[in-house]
Amino acid sequence: MKYRAYILPGFPGFFIRNNAIMIFKVALYFKNTLFRTSGAY
């Protein structure tokens, strides 16, 4: 219970920051694979 009260205040920002990094990595990965399969890469 104490752990949850401690982790919740900083959770949204932490979650959004991690998601932004994950989305960025996924976008880069898809961009590279799309270029490679289309022959432009």
Image: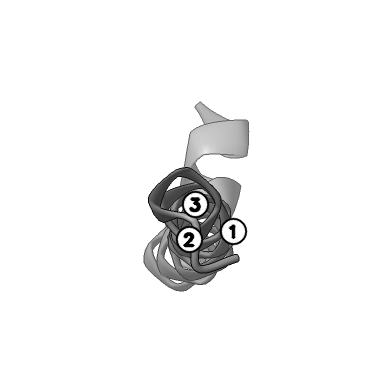
Residue denoted by label 2: 35
Q: CA distance from mark 3 to mark 1?
A: 4 Å
At label 2, which amino acid type do we have? Phe
Secondary structure, mark 2, is helix
Tell me which residue sits at (59%, 51%) in the image. Answer: 6
Whether residues under marks 3 and 1 lie with C-beta atoms below 8 angstroms apart, the answer is: yes
Q: CA distance from mark 2 to mark 1?
A: 15 Å
Residue denoted by label 3: 26
Precedes in sequence: disc 2 or disc 1: 1
Which label lies toward us, 2 or 3? Answer: 2
Secondary structure, mark 1, is helix
Front-most of residues 25 and 14: 25
Tell me which residue sits at (56%, 49%) in the image. Answer: 7
Indicate the position of residue 27 as horizontal and vertical percent values: 44, 62
Left/right placement of residue 25 relative to residue 9 reads: right
Q: CA distance from mark 2 to mark 3?
A: 14 Å
Which label number is shown at residue 25? 1
Indicate the position of residue 24 as horizontal and vertical percent values: 51, 68
Indicate the position of residue 40 as horizontal and vertical percent values: 50, 68
At label 1, which amino acid type do we have? Lys
Q: Residue furthest front?
A: 39
The quadrant of the rendering that contains the C terminus is bottom right
Precedes in sequence: disc 2 or disc 3: 3
